[in-house]
Image (cartoon, rainbow, N blue to C red):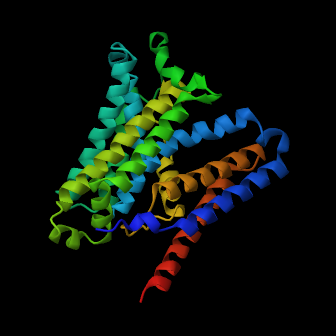
Amino acid sequence: MRNLGSGFGEMRHLGLLGALALLIVVGLVTRPENFATTSNLVSILSLAATIGVITVGATFVIIGGGIDLSVGAVMALASVWATTLATQSYGPVVMAICAVLVGTGAGLVNGLLIAYGRLVPFIATLAMLVAARGLAQRMSDRKTQLIQAENASLVELSTTRVLGIPLLVYIFALVVVLGWVVLNRTTFGRRTYAVGGNPEAARLAGIDVRRHTMLLYALSGLCCGIAAILIMARTTTGSSTHGDLYELDAIAAVIIGGTLLTGGRGTIVGSILGLLIFTLITNLFILNGLNTSDQLIAKGLIIVVAVLLQRRNLKERAP
């Protein structure tokens, strides 16, 4: 089966690169003394890394015809579980494994409810959002949990730099590369496009649609667990407030990157470009001292415009 994502969106990618260039020009014009600095670049990349790992998982889910609203809450739950005193007593490696297992487990629950429980993805992941956030609050007693000194090696992912760039950015880049390879060079990726494009045709072609759907949500949860490690390294804490509205940024980045909400078409590259656009917008708002509420309004408008453009393009392509 032909990979629908391979040729799709090349012109769109050029448009996204143009938008990035425009934002860079805006930054250089409005805040040249603050924008074009090494520290600001590192700040942009570090912020993009955490949300970016989640965005990779969200790209798979949306191409597969689903949606995952629980990513921010699952990341928060994974960070809280990994920073409890009981978990920390086993050291940083176990903390990292715990975060990954909790994230993957939550994603697997989503997948089981959607694929085998026949729940609508919106409802299932919304329920997980509420439950995961509540469980995180219950476990932490609504308190921020600090990473203990003996586990400081986990924090070094944020403080250690190679060529001036924190290690967590390299982890993000590795996840992006692996995500691209899986989506574009493996049977799993081809099946993801097939399931999202036409589930019934995929089933008739011999694909176990329910099993594949379950695995897509487990993959999204895995990415949330990795993102939890990165945010623990950045903040030196585990907290039930981590990842607030990350689902907005991740899903918006995927949509802006050209992935269809109906599934079957999209690219990892487009999603990452969309993420960088959102991250740059956030950075420019902060540097220029603009209101956070205005930032949310701007992001909301961008999402609406992106979806309207998608619908227009689909109508133009329709025979």
Q: In which quarter of the image is residue 194?
A: bottom left
Q: In this view, does 68 lie above or below 148?
A: below
**Residue lying farthest bottom?**
319
Q: Residue drawn 60% across and 50% down?
A: 276
Query: Which residue is nearer to you in this view: 161 or 237?
Result: 161
The percent position of residue 307, horizontal first and vertical second, equals: 52, 71
The percent position of residue 59, horizontal first and vertical second, equals: 42, 55
In this rendering, position of residue 281 left or right of residue 248: right
Q: Is residue 103 above or below residue 14?
A: above
The percent position of residue 249, horizontal first and vertical second, equals: 53, 52
Q: In this view, does 117 lie above or below 147?
A: below
* Residue 144 visible in the displayed image: no
The percent position of residue 109, horizontal first and vertical second, equals: 24, 46
Q: In which quarter of the image is residue 261?
A: bottom left
Q: On the rendered image, what quadrant is the N terminus found in? A: bottom left
Q: Residue drawn 41% across and 89% down?
A: 319
Q: In this view, does 31 lie above or below 147?
A: below
